[in-house]
């Protein structure tokens, strides 16, 4: 009997990419393929790419090179955002055999019919306007949490962003399909779902250019809160103008939604927000943070911010720094601006030098560590519910509280995928929180 062909996957970028890679992996398994670790040497490598930053493009080339080290004759397929934006460029990477765009990636098995390596890579890449269907996806394999895709694409036109060009128009799954997927996830033993998408607050728009809002994000949240078997549901990232007071109020009273929001800001000055074509001002952002903290004082709030955007003077940056410093937030994700082709911002005046971008990034990373430490300190000597994960390093395992405090404990296989009531005792050298021994089992 012929052994099944081996396939390995590598994912760059966001949680949404992870959910889609996992779904494509299940399609391969259902068709008789064996999924193996990257280093094991596969017959087929599928690399799901990101193109939010220039660095992500470089990573793709490096992953291809590493795959060929492990399996020199492997068939290499590239999918994802980079594959939609620059298929011809990817096709020139030595060893790449096939490039699939956004409308084709879920049909990968249809295209892989001959694994013979050819001199020139095949490209299947329709115009992004044809990527208008929604394909349900969720990650599978991590017993602790699952990334559940509820929305795809984006109708916004931020001046720095290539995602609408890479993923197409905003479109959503139905509430019924998402609730069904959540129930399947619950039945598998997973205890936490993370809702993902490109612009999940815009949830409700239909497929194939049908822009009717069948349901709102609030209605989806309300429906998911009723799914039995899931202990926690986390909202991955939501635009401040789409995070309504009604959503905040519902989460504050929810059985399953946890007190954790990740809200992109990008700049703390209205001047730069206007240049970025963001759909809010800093005053609205501050209102959202205040409302969250009013209803959920222990809520964790994460913030995306971009430094070095064209036109950002030192005074503008300091205004952003001071705005963030004064906000009651918990941590920052800091992005250094990088020019992307076919975006308006790439031709803006007032380019910030590379060393200045790096200095500003460093300042905000330091601020983020201060914010995170202060947030953690507010919860020391308190009891918290922790969901422990399977990964361990040097005998130490980690877990997260409902409000996203990362805790460390001595590895114990009994704790994996368990919810335990623990006492947070001290912040360790890695910046995580140590705990007392976990004794009370809250969930099986």
Image (tube, rainbow, N blue to C red):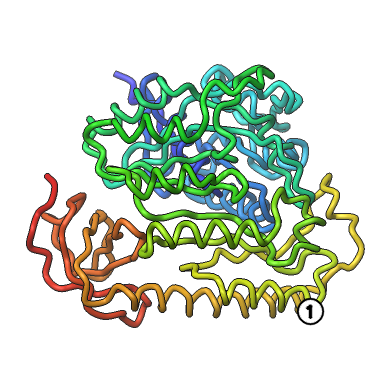
Q: Secondary structure at mark 1?
A: helix
The quarter holding residue 133 reads top right
Q: Position of residue 335 (x, y in %)?
A: 64, 63
The C terminus, quarter of image: top left
Q: Nearer the viewer, residue 251 or 397?
A: 251
- The residue labelled by disc 1 is 314
10 Å crowding of disc 1: few (<14), some (14-19), many (20+): few
Q: Position of residue 232 (x, y in %)?
A: 30, 45
Q: Nearer the viewer, residue 318 or 123?
A: 318
Is residue 385 depicted above or below 187 in this figure?
A: below
Is residue 145 depicted above or below 259 in this figure?
A: above
Q: Position of residue 386 (x, y in %)?
A: 23, 59
**Taking 417 as reference, is 270 left or right?**
right
The quarter holding residue 287 reads bottom right
The N terminus, quarter of image: top left
> Residue at coordinates 13% horizontally, 47% vertically from top-left?
443
> Residue at coordinates 85% horizontally, 55% vertically from top-left?
346
Q: Nearer the viewer, residue 288 or 153?
A: 288
**Taking 325 as reference, is 337 left or right?**
right
**Taking 367 as reference, is 2 left or right?**
left
Q: Is residue 10 visible?
A: no
**Taking 321 as reference, is 8 left or right?**
left
Q: Is residue 239 visible?
A: yes
């Amino acid at each position: 009997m012929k052994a099944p062909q081996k396939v390995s996957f590598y994912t760059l970028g966001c949680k949404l990419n992870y959910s889609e890679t996992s779904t494509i992996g299940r399609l391969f398994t259902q068709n008789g393929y064996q999924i193996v670790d990257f280093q094991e040497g596969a017959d087929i490598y599928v690399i799901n790419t990101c193109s939010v930053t220039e660095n992500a493009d470089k990573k793709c080339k490096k992953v291809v090179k590493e795959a060929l080290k492990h399996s020199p004759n492997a068939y290499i397929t590239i999918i994802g955002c980079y594959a939609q934006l620059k298929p011809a460029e990817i096709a020139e990477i030595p060893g790449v055999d096939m490039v699939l765009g956004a409308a084709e990636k879920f049909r990968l098995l249809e295209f892989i019919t001959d694994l013979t390596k050819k001199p020139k890579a095949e490209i299947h890449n329709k115009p992004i306007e044809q990527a208008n269907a929604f394909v349900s996806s969720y990650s599978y394999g991590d017993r602790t949490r699952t990334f559940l895709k509820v929305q795809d694409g984006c109708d916004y036109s931020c001046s720095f962003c290539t995602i609408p060009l890479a993923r197409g128009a905003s479109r959503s799954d139905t509430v019924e399909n998402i609730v069904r997927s959540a129930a399947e996830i619950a039945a598998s033993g997973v205890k936490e779902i993370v809702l993902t998408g490109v612009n999940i607050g815009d949830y409700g728009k239909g497929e194939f250019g049908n822009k009717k809002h069948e349901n709102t994000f609030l209605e989806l949240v309300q429906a998911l809160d009723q799914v039995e078997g899931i202990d926690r549901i986390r909202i991955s990232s939501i635009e401040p103008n789409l995070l309504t007071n009604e959503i905040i109020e519902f989460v504050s009273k929810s059985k399953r939604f946890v007190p954790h929001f990740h809200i992109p800001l990008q700049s703390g000055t209205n001047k730069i927000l206007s240049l970025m074509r963001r759909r809010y001002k800093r005053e609205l952002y501050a209102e959202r943070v205040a409302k969250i903290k009013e209803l959920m004082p222990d809520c964790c709030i994460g913030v995306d911010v971009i430094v070095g955007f064209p036109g950002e003077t030192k005074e503008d940056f300091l205004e952003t720094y001071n705005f963030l410093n004064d906000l009651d937030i918990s941590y920052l994700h800091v992005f250094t601006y990088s020019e992307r082709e076919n975006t308006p911002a790439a031709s803006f005046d007032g380019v910030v030098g590379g060393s200045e971008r790096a200095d500003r990034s460093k300042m905000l990373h330091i601020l983020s560590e201060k914010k995170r430490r202060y947030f953690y300190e507010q919860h020391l000597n308190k009891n918290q519910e922790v969901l422990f994960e399977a990964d361990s390093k040097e005998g130490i395992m980690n877990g997260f509280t409902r409000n996203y405090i990362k805790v460390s404990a001595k590895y114990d296989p009994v704790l994996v995928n368990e919810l335990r009531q623990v006492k947070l005792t001290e912040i360790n050298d890695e910046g995580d929180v140590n705990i007392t021994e976990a004794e009370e089992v809250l969930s099986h």
